[in-house]
Amino acid sequence: MAPIARLAMAVLLFSATFINAAPTATTVDNDAHIAGFSRAVSQAAPGVKLVYKCTVPNTMAITFDDGPFEYTADLVKLFNKKKAKATFFINGSNNGKITDYAAAVKQAYLDGHQIASHTWDHGDLATMNAEQITAEMTKLDVAIKKIIGVSPTYMRPPYGSINDLVTKTIGAKYTIGGGGDVDDYKKSLKVYTDKVKKANGKPGEIVLQHETIKLTAQELAPRAIDYAQKMGWKLVTVGECLGKSKDTWYRK
Ligand SMILES: [Zn+2]
């Protein structure tokens, strides 16, 4: 997607969280809709896990989409230094090729950050048939397993875009994550801090940023960590913020 279109989408997602957008379909899960899923999301079928909020008190999950990329290794070091954990929803072939950043992905995993799936090549799952959806997931699972020895059980759909076929096809196998977009395309620390403040005292946020944006990786991320910690949040992985033990974040 062209940068300007991505910016527009981020703004749209963010606005939706504050204007409390009306449901666009009778079966829409409005909480999910305003929390990072860009299409109407039907009420999840039994067994399908849609997550977009932390459940463990005082925890927040800062997450990065669209990598791995040239900033991944430094982000891992940054989070380590700040005694914080991050979750990386990575692609196989997007801004970078996963094989080119295998060392950074492995280091992130070894240091206790969570590696999760953002599909092989960042296609819109809601436009695909079941076979294509499965291929997007499986191809990346295999590539990640080659690097860290296990494959992820958490995924975030590109563009927050899912439909009933997506949840039916992969919902039993993956926890499907949303998360509030903090609009990092505008490198807006204020947007982030407002969101953190708004969430303070409530179950924490799962915050979405893009590690492929230099300003996010180098300027927003360090300030975001400092600010959240100053406000009393414990920065953990998505799995931890949901109270799930590490052995459930991956499968062999
Ligand atoms: Zn993405």
Image (tube, rainbow, N blue to C red):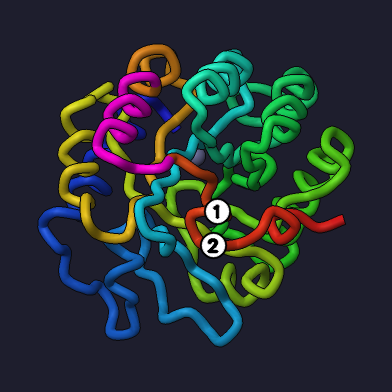
Q: Can you give x and y, in whole percent of width and height, for residue 74 in the image?
A: 57, 14
The stretch in magenta equals: 222-234
Q: Amino acid at mark 2?
A: Gly
Does the CB distance between marks 2 and 1 fall below 8 Å? yes
Q: Amino acid at mark 1?
A: Glu
What x and y, as percent, mark residue 162? 49, 63
Task: Give the overall secondary structure of the magenta segment.
Answer: helix
Is 33 above or below relative to 100?
A: below
Q: Which labelled disc corresponds to residue 195?
A: none
Residue at image position (60%, 54%) is: 155
- Identify the element where label 1 is drawn: helix
Q: Is residue 126 visible?
A: no
Residue 133 at least partly seen = yes
Residue drawn at x 57%, y 55% is 239
Question: Is 83 above or below relative to 70?
Answer: below
Q: Which residue is mark 1?
A: 240
Q: Residues within 10 Å of mark 1 (few under 14, many from 20)?
A: many
Give SS at disc 2. Answer: loop
Residue 243: image location, x then y, percent: 54, 62
Q: CA gap, disc 2 to disc 1?
A: 5 Å
Pick whichever, 177 or 62, lies toward us: 62
Q: Residue at x 52, y 51 (%)?
A: 238
Find out whether residue 233 is within the magenta segment.
yes
Residue that numbered label 2 is attached to: 243
The N terminus sits in image quarter: top left
> As drawn, is 163 to the left or to the right of 19?
right
Query: From what the image shows, is residue 83 above or below residue 126?
Result: above
Which of these two is toward me, 13 or 241? 241
Quarter of the image containing the C terminus? bottom right
Kindly identify the residue that appears in the image at 21 percent across and 43 percent down: 195
Q: Nearer the viewer, residue 215 or 4?
A: 215
Image side of residue 36 versus residue 102, left or right: left
